[in-house]
Image (tube, rainbow, N blue to C red):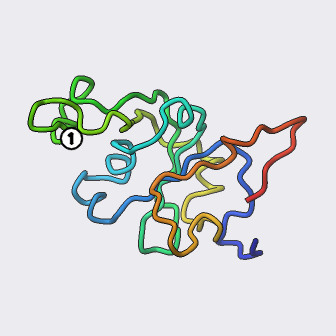
Amino acid sequence: MTNDPNTIQEFDENCVIIKVRPETVRGRGSVYGAVRWAWIANLEKISRADYVLAVQTGTGGKVIGVYKPTIWYKATAENDKRYEHFLNEGGSERDERRIAFQGEEAEIKIKEKYFNKYIPYEYRKPGMAAPVLYVNIDFPRFLGQRVKA
């Protein structure tokens, strides 16, 4: 871990980091539009996230958005017409593991903690191609202990 004040030192909350490309942000019109759908993830596991941190690729792990999800759901054409391009030619879902969320910007206290900061190196090592990373979700916190980054 680094002592750099621009790097997140500790995650106190259950978070999911989702990496987004700049062209996706432009194409969907906003950071929120880019980060909120349609990622391959386990719905039950990702639903435990208190916050979503949008990290732009090509920035060295910089957090460009912090959101509080209010609901997670399967990203299907039945749930939302935007997902129609994920259908196979026969009309079946190409990948039923895709998920989405609806939410709002995180409260100021949380945004100040994460926004415009860099995620720790362990979450952005070379070769880490997974766009969805879980923080504190697999590890229970006992008696107020926090899992450090």
Q: In the rendered picture of this protein, how many numbered marks are placed on residues?
A: 1
What is the crowding at mark 1: few (fewer than 14 residues within 10 Å), some, or many (at least 20)? some
Q: Amino acid at mark 1?
A: Phe
Residue 23 image offset from top left, x and y in percent: 26, 64
Residue 97 image offset from top left, x and y in percent: 38, 36
User: Quick one: which residue is furthest to the front in this view?
Assistant: 90
User: Quick one: which residue is furthest to the left in this view?
Assistant: 89
Residue 147 image offset from top left, x and y in percent: 78, 50
Q: Quadrant of residue 26?
A: bottom left
Where 76 falls versus 34 (above or below)? above
| Helix, strand or loop under label 1 | helix
Q: Quadrant of residue 100?
A: top left
Which residue: 65% across, 67% down? 122
Which residue: 49% across, 36% down? 42
Residue assigned mark 1: 86
Residue 40 image offset from top left, x and y in percent: 40, 44
Q: Quadrant of residue 50?
A: top right
Where 148 falls versus 142 (above or below)? below
Which residue: 22% across, 23% down? 78
Of 102 and 139, the residue lying toward us: 139
User: Quick one: which residue is furthest to the top in this view?
Assistant: 78
Where 76 falls versus 6 (above or below)? above
Where 81 falls versus 41 (above or below)? above
- Compared across the picture, whether 78 is left or right of 98 comes to left
Of 18 and 108, the residue lying toward us: 18
